[in-house]
Amino acid sequence: MSETETIKQVEQAEQEQPAQEAPKKKRWFGKKEKVKKTPMQELREWVVTLAVALVIAFVVRSFLFEPVRVDGSSMATTLTNGEVMFVTKPEYLMGDPERFDVVICHYPGRGDTNFVKRVVGLPGDTVAVQDGFLYVNGEKYEEPYITHRPDYILAPYTVPEGMYFVLGDNRSNSNDSHLVGPIERDMIVGHVRSVLWPLDKWRTIE
């Protein structure tokens, strides 16, 4: 066999040999194989998720806003029994209540029980109720939200510093400062902004 024929056979063999596959590139963004978790790992994740949710809920209710249900008729007809109010809190964390704000507050000796009342007297104000009308520092207020005028008389009373005088809008049927006295500033915890429920009763509260 001649040298020329040998070279041709080698070239022919190389052409018939299948090309070697190029190495596969590593897929960086491919799906990762899901690792099966043990029951203990799943339980631990569930507990952590629940704990985080509870912390968030606590922070929101304590410092931002909270839905509160009206219980009773002491604020009729501004608020009626069973309605759910939208109560905000940041303004009272950074500032103080203003006169005639509708607020959520606590009473001495009643723990964390919520009461909804209207602030009528600020620290240093002199408050009185005569002939069914509220007087603050000698000025008479018509209070158009009042539908049931009080049947009691409140002699002029000066609110101590750091204290607030609160009354219900249903003046003759309200357990408020005319019975329990003024309340401390830190007992006022939220500002009632609106009624959320029932939906057909939604309204802002002034």
Image (tube, rainbow, N blue to C red):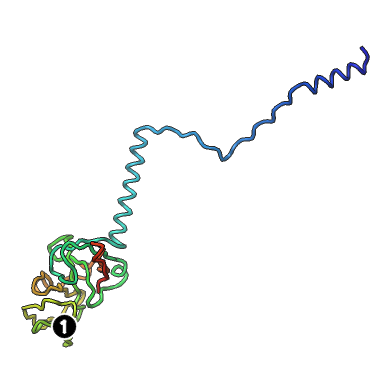
Q: In the rendered image, which quarter contains the C terminus?
A: bottom left
Name which quarter of the figure residue 9 lies in: top right
The percent coordinates of residue 78 (x first, y second) are 19, 71
- Work out whether residue 16 or residue 122 is closer to the camera in this orientation and state it: 16
Q: Is residue 145 left or right of residue 7?
A: left
Element at badge 1? strand
The percent coordinates of residue 124 (x first, y second) are 19, 81
Furthest residue toward top: 1
Q: Is residue 173 left or right of residue 144?
A: left
Image point (20%, 78%), residue name: 123
Q: Amino acid at mark 1?
A: Thr
Furthest residue toward front: 200
Image point (78%, 21%), residue name: 16
How many dots with numbers? 1
Image point (34%, 34%), residue name: 40
- Work out whether residue 70 or residue 56 is closer to the camera in this orientation and state it: 70
Furthest residue toward bottom: 138
The percent coordinates of residue 205 (x first, y second) are 25, 71
Q: Which residue is mark 1?
A: 126
The percent coordinates of residue 163 (x first, y second) are 19, 74
Name which quarter of the figure residue 84 lies in: bottom left
Image point (30%, 72%), residue name: 95
Crowd class of label 1 (few under 14; some 14 to 19; many from 20; radius 10 Å): many
Q: Is residue 149 left or right of residue 161?
A: left
Residue 143 in the image: above or below residue 190: below
Q: In the rendered image, which quarter contains the N terminus?
A: top right
Residue 3 in the image: above or below residue 111: above
